[in-house]
């Protein structure tokens, strides 16, 4: 069974730094608490407060990660909704500002418009920017993509099996993969082949990287190793 490991690229020498990554993903809060201090939601949470996002409004990507979960456009949701183990919660764009940027352009290092702050964070810069109402017109819905969290995984499945997914950094269990199209981990996400095929057209390769794995091949390799050790 094939699966894909998806990781975010938040730094790449000469191309991407924290500021550029923030221009792409934006920042977010929930119920007044900014990430990473906001309440974490997974697919089993009692969904009360939506994710409030502040970001550059010039171009909004179909898949971004302003907080702990991915935020995806409605057209992505339509492709993922048929897959098992996922939930979606509508997000809100409360600020869409205008700032021209591009990959590899580091002129922001010399900006005076950082609000008079010395060595400000990208989050502080975004806070100084004004909302552009025109960007909110005709804005299509976006949703927070909710997956099963590692703690929920341990509760739902045998502890020993789920531990292998979270700690060994690879989802060996085919059962878990069949019932959960996307798995969250400390290093990124694991996607079934169907989930990856649904999302791949919307992933910006400048900000995401992925690797294909094969659980069957891994099992075969482990079998070979056991035979050699006898």
Image (spheres, rainbow, N blue to C red):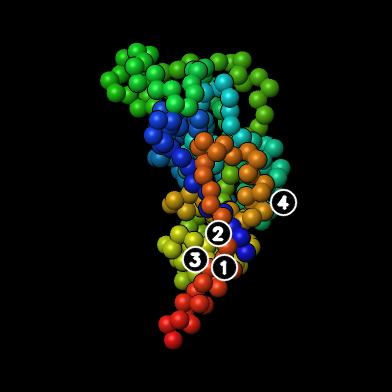
The residue wearing badge 4 is 82
**Which residue position is annotated with label 3?**
162
Q: CA distance from mark 1 to mark 3?
A: 20 Å
Would you name the residue on which mark 2 appears? 213
Position of the C terminus, as image quadrant, is bottom left
Q: Nearer the viewer, residue 99 or 78?
A: 99
Closer to the eye: label 1 or 3:
1
Give the crowd class for mark 2: few <14, some 14-19, many >=20 residues within 10 Å.
some
* Helix, strand or loop for disc 2: strand
Residue 116 in view: yes
Check disc 4: other Cα within 10 Å, few if <14, some if 14-19, many if 20+: few
Left or right side of 177 for 128: left
- Mark 3 surroundings: few (<14), some (14-19) or many (≥20) residues within 10 A: many
Separation of disc 4 and disc 3 at Cα?
24 Å
Q: Secondary structure at mark 4?
A: loop
Question: In the visual, does 89 lie left or right of 67?
Answer: right
Residue 192 screen position, x and y as percent: 61, 56
Percent across and percent down for residue 133 are 59, 16
From the viewer's perspective, is the residue at label 3 or at label 2 nearer? Answer: 2
Query: Mark 1 touching mark 2, by CB under 8 A?
Result: yes
Q: Residue at point 51% right, 44% down?
A: 209
Q: Which residue is mark 1?
A: 217
The span from disc 1 to disc 2 (Cα, nearest Å) is 8 Å
Q: Would residue 35 be seen by someone viewing this image from the given angle? A: no
Give the residue at x 40% y 40%: 36
Q: Identify the residue at image location x=48%, y=49%.
A: 188
Give the image quarter of residue 34: top left
Crowd around label 1: few <14 · some 14–19 · many ≥20 (10 Å): few
Chain-order first, disc 3 or disc 2: 3
Tag 2 or tag 4, which sits nearer the N-term?
Answer: 4
Q: On the rendered image, what quadrant is the N terminus found in? A: bottom right
Q: Secondary structure at mark 3?
A: helix
């Amino acid at each position: 069974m094939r699966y894909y490991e998806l990781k975010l690229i938040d730094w790449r020498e000469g191309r991407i730094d924290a500021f550029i990554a923030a221009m792409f993903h934006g920042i977010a809060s929930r119920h007044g608490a900014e990430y990473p201090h906001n309440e974490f939601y997974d697919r089993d949470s009692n969904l009360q407060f939506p994710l409030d996002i502040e970001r550059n409004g010039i171009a909004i990507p179909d898949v971004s990660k302003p907080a702990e979960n991915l935020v995806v456009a409605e057209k992505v949701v339509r492709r993922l909704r048929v897959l098992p183990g996922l939930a979606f919660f509508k997000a809100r764009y409360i600020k869409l500002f205008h700032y021209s940027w591009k990959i590899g352009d580091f002129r922001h290092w010399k900006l005076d418009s950082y609000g008079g702050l010395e060595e400000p964070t990208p989050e502080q810069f975004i806070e100084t920017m004004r909302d552009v109402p025109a960007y909110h017109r005709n804005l299509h819905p976006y949703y927070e993509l909710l997956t099963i969290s590692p703690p929920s995984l341990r509760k739902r499945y045998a502890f020993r099996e789920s531990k292998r997914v979270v700690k060994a950094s690879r989802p060996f269990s085919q059962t878990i993969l069949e019932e959960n199209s996307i798995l969250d981990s400390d290093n990124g996400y694991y996607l079934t082949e169907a989930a990856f095929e649904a999302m791949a057209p919307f992933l910006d390769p400048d900000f995401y990287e992925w690797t294909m794995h094969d659980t069957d091949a891994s099992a075969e390799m482990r079998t070979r190793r056991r035979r050699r050790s006898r």
